[in-house]
Amino acid sequence: MKRSEINNYIKEAEIIFRENNFYLPPWAFWNVEDWEKNKETCTNIFSSFLGWDLTDFGSGNFLKTGLLLVTLRNGNKDFDVKPYAEKIMIVKENQETPFHFHWEKTEDIINRGGGNLVIELYNSDSNEAFSKSNVTFLCDGIKKNISAGGRVVLTPGESITLRTGMYHRFYAEEGGGPVIAGEVSMTNDDAHDNRFYTAPGRFPEIVEDEEPYRLLVGDYKRIL
């Protein structure tokens, strides 16, 4: 992805968060110079990978297959004992986060506002392929069951619990606008705890055609 594209999507996201009264931490609005000035006190942010994150999952088409998110809090076994994480995401209409599961992390995905969030589910089998078995899950504490590959539609305020080994992909339903989606989970490790079914990668290759508007979590090495 081009840095200019990333910058524009982040600017758009800031407007969406503001219009929906979702407030980010002050460091979410720092520029490179701010990070340079404050880096000595931000060890926890760097080690826990808090901050802006944007990916096209190696697709080359962010609007078709991609996700923008901010990791707001996260534990790190080498730094602290916090056992939980929280993210906020913007999911555009028909913008897919492709099928994947987590070996270690159980998570809740919450529709915080906007349109409807569609989630498709499979169990995984012993070979980490799609299972044909029905999928049992919780929506806001209510037990539900769907067939393999079935769709769950979360309206604003609704959530789903995704267990380890449960394949899921999601996107905003067409016609309802983007979704602000939250994630509350066990400690998050995007480098080692994502098993994608077909997607080639989690982090994008960036073409530096202009300076960063906001640093991504993958950019922190610039100032360390």
Image: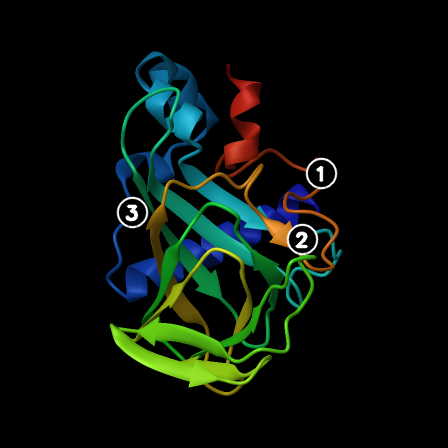
> Which amino acid, mark 1?
Asp
Q: Identify the residue position indicated by label 1 in the image.
A: 209
Spot occupied by residue 153 in the image (x, y as percentages of width and height): 43, 83
Q: Quadrant of residue 209?
A: top right
Residue 155 visible within the image: no
Q: Residue at x 36, y 39 (%)?
A: 29
Using the image, determine if residue 28 lies above or below residue 106. Answer: above
**What mark, if any, has residue 24 been given in the picture?**
3
Q: Nearer the viewer, residue 190 or 62?
A: 190
Q: Earlier in the sequence, mark 1 or mark 2?
A: 2
Q: Nearer the viewer, residue 205 or 37?
A: 205
Q: Of discs 1 and 2, which sits in the foreground?
A: 2
Q: Secondary structure at mark 2?
A: loop
Q: Identify the residue position indicated by label 2 in the image.
A: 57
Q: Quadrant of residue 174?
A: bottom right
Q: Secondary structure at mark 3?
A: loop
Spot occupied by residue 203 in the image (x, y as percentages of width and height): 64, 43
